[in-house]
Image: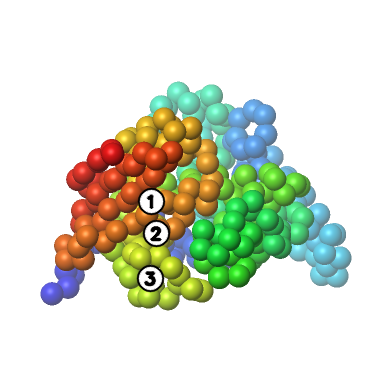
Amino acid sequence: MADDSHEQPTTYGSLSPEAALGLLGNDVRAEILWALSEARGEDGPPALSFSELRERVAERREARARAARDPDPPESLDSSQFNYHLQQLVGHFVERRGEDGTAESQLVPAMAGDHGDGYALRPEGTTLTRTVRSMTFTDEATRDSLDVGLDCYFCETAVETAYGNGICKVQCPDCEYLYDYNLTPPGVVADSDAKTLSRVARYNRHVRLAFADGVCPYCASDVGHSFKDPAETGYPGRDRRTVLLHRQCGHCGNMDNLTLGEFLLGDPELVAFCHEHGVDVRSTPIWDLAFAATDQSVTVRSRDPWELALEVRLDGDTLELVVDDELSVVERTRT
Ligand SMILES: [Zn+2]
Ligand SMILES: [Zn+2]
């Protein structure tokens, strides 16, 4: 039976998420948030006085109209219009700091003084503008067919990576095994191929290990897990994995499919075993770790309940880790 007493989630300021997003549908408010976001990146306090904020917003609107050669530029903002829009954001995405205002986002009240008086982004406003900035780029954010420097573990063809439309793909062009397919900010694209590859490898590691650890990297909620047959996921392309560890955040909807080897990359015994054999699993790209990039080292011991074994072989030595239905490592055996 549905629990009608369950409270709906609200943002700071007791708005529904939809109502909070609805506050943003105005160009003056967007400019206010952006001006305060830019102020955070400057030397000095990230708070702007009413008059300075208004001046910056007016300048930005005029500059945008000039750049767009808008034949019908926006009307100049009078103080009361500007204040109306600013106050719509205060208490939700923006806060007023100083003697007459509040600084409720500061856990240490003295910090509010150190960070200046006036208007500043609340954490929600910072997160929002950061999210938009993270998907913003100046040059063309695409890369085609970068050679990863790895021969496919299945067919020995050179594996390639490509980036476009906010997605990074690492795939074998011949057998189509997908080494990675990840929503990735355009900041991953760098001037040189080597730097782009390094960023791809490290960004993927951040995301994968955060999911493996069980705390959502976007909203800090627990992520749940289930084991899945790759055929159940509708994953694009041919997938040669035996079993996927599906992790999903029930709060923000973020999800990922991990190999067992990726999940175990933080296991202290595995880290130590690899280190003793000259492999630093914290800096090696995941695609260079065969036991994490594929399921060639995975054995399904049981499906009900799930029990999986990962065998890592290096220089003739073997480490076997066994994981149960609850993702606990129940055996660690060296031979
Ligand atoms: Zn291949
Ligand atoms: Zn989440």
- Residue at 43% x, 68% y is 240
Q: Disc 1, disc 3: CB below 8 Å? A: no
**Mark number, residue 113:** none
For residue 2, side relative to residue 131 (left or right): left
Q: Could you give the CA–CA distance between mark 2 and mark 1, rounded to whole angstroms?
A: 8 Å
Q: Could you say whether the residue bearing mark 2 is in a helix, strand or loop?
A: loop
Packing grade of label 2 (10 A; few <14, some 14-19, many >=20) is some
Q: Could you give the CA–CA distance between mark 1 and mark 3, rounded to whole angstroms?
A: 15 Å
**Label located before the other in sequence (3 or 2):** 3
The quarter of the displayed image where residue 253 is located? bottom left
- Residue at 35% x, 65% y is 242
**Label located before the other in sequence (2 or 1):** 1
- Would residue 74 be seen by someone viewing this image from the given angle? yes
The quarter of the displayed image where residue 235 is located? bottom left
**Location of the N terminus (image quadrant):** bottom left
- Residue at 24% x, 49% y is 322
Q: Could you give the CA–CA distance between mark 3 and mark 2, rounded to whole angstroms?
A: 11 Å
Q: Position of residue 130 (x, y in %)?
A: 57, 49
**Mark number, residue 261:** 1
Q: Label 2 belongs to which residue?
A: 295
Q: Label 3 belongs to which residue?
A: 230
Q: Residue furthest left?
A: 1
Q: Position of residue 62 (x, y in %)?
A: 80, 56
